[in-house]
Amino acid sequence: MSDTYTGPDVLSWSCPAPLRDRPRVVMGHGGGGAMSAELVEQVFLPALGGPPPGGLTDSATVELGGARLAFSTDSFVVRPLFFPGGSIGDLAVNGTVNDLAMSGARPAFLSCGVILEEGVEIATVGRVAEALGAAARAAGVRVVTGDTKVVESGHGDGVYINTAGIGLVPPGVDPRPERVVPGDVVIVSGAIGLHGVAILSERENLEFEAEIESDCAALGGLVEAMLAVTPDVHVMRDPTRGGLAASLNEIAAASGTGVVVRERAVPVPPPVASACAILGLDPMYVANEGKLVAFVPRDRAEAVLAAMRAHPLGAEAAVIGEAVAEHPGMVVARTGLGGTRVVDMPLGEQLPRIC
């Protein structure tokens, strides 16, 4: 970024925190935002003996027999099961493959657990299975183990899927938020907001000025292209639940740096911008399923950006901001009018059940 940023006067700001003490689970607890984090931190981590050595990430990096492995698991409860650009079967593969790729790993094997609701049509299950298999082949991974369960009618939503994955992390590759330093350049791989708006349009039978399809895709090949330029990518995230805003906030909090985003540099497709304007949504908080955001050293940013743009899934990659020493743990956006706004961690999810 060419101009110098001095940072906002954060000491003059105040914002009352909403009360989130709830005796029961609500939909916001599954939205990937602050409520999800609180549920994990206050309920699960104490019961499991605290956070793992590598911290809380979408995939864990572990040592086994001298090899570094990435290990991840995810569950998929999207409604509807089929949507423009994909299905729950595609999501079940690509979501887990992408979590592995964000650790710098080459995804290799998946497990697949399927929960079926009594009464769902076998033809529907077959379509899901076909989509899942095709996505696995496209991603270059094999489903090597699995399980199937059936629940009574009315106790599910047709099909739920859990996938877990394992991949190998190459030597010298170590992307994690603690490596982010002031001056790092923030790059997003392409247009944001497509998946969430595609799900919403199908679910609510909404029509916009142009058809919007999910960006659901496996990002392993794009990550390999980036790491071929330099293994020194400081951190990568796929901004799914909670969107780009959640990923940037998680990285800022874990790294202890501030993040500045140039709002006009964030690639938002016109149909997504129009849909969000009509529905009162912020594209920064809308889910994606085939995009990544990376923090890279400034002296490697141009080379990484060129490598991304040479790959089909990174053709629209753009520099959107930088890490700064000011306002550690906070993400701010510079607006087109020259102002500054805080891009806070989402509380829950603008659009529930999107993955």
Image (spheres, rainbow, N blue to C red):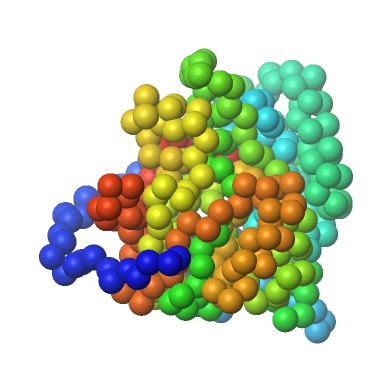
- Judge whether 85 appears above or below 208 on screen: below
Identify the residue at horizontal 81%, vertical 26% (top origin). 126
Give the x, y percent position of residue 99: 65, 57
Position of 175 with respect to 30 (left or right) is: right
Where, quadrant-wise, is the N terminus in this rendering?
bottom left
Q: Residue at x 46, y 36 (%)?
A: 352
126 to the left or right of 284 = right
Up the image or down, 128 lies above or below 187; here it is above
Could you say which is closer to the camera, residue 148 or residue 307?
307
133 or 7, which lies in front?
7
Name the quarter where the C terminus is drawn: top right
Judged left or right of residue 120, residue 67 is: right
Q: Residue at x 71, y 64 (%)?
A: 226
Q: Residue most toward the bottom?
A: 66
Asked whether residue 198 is in view, the answer is yes
What residue is shown at x 41% (from left), y 47% (from top)? 264
Instruction: Answer above or below: position of 286 versus 70.
Output: above
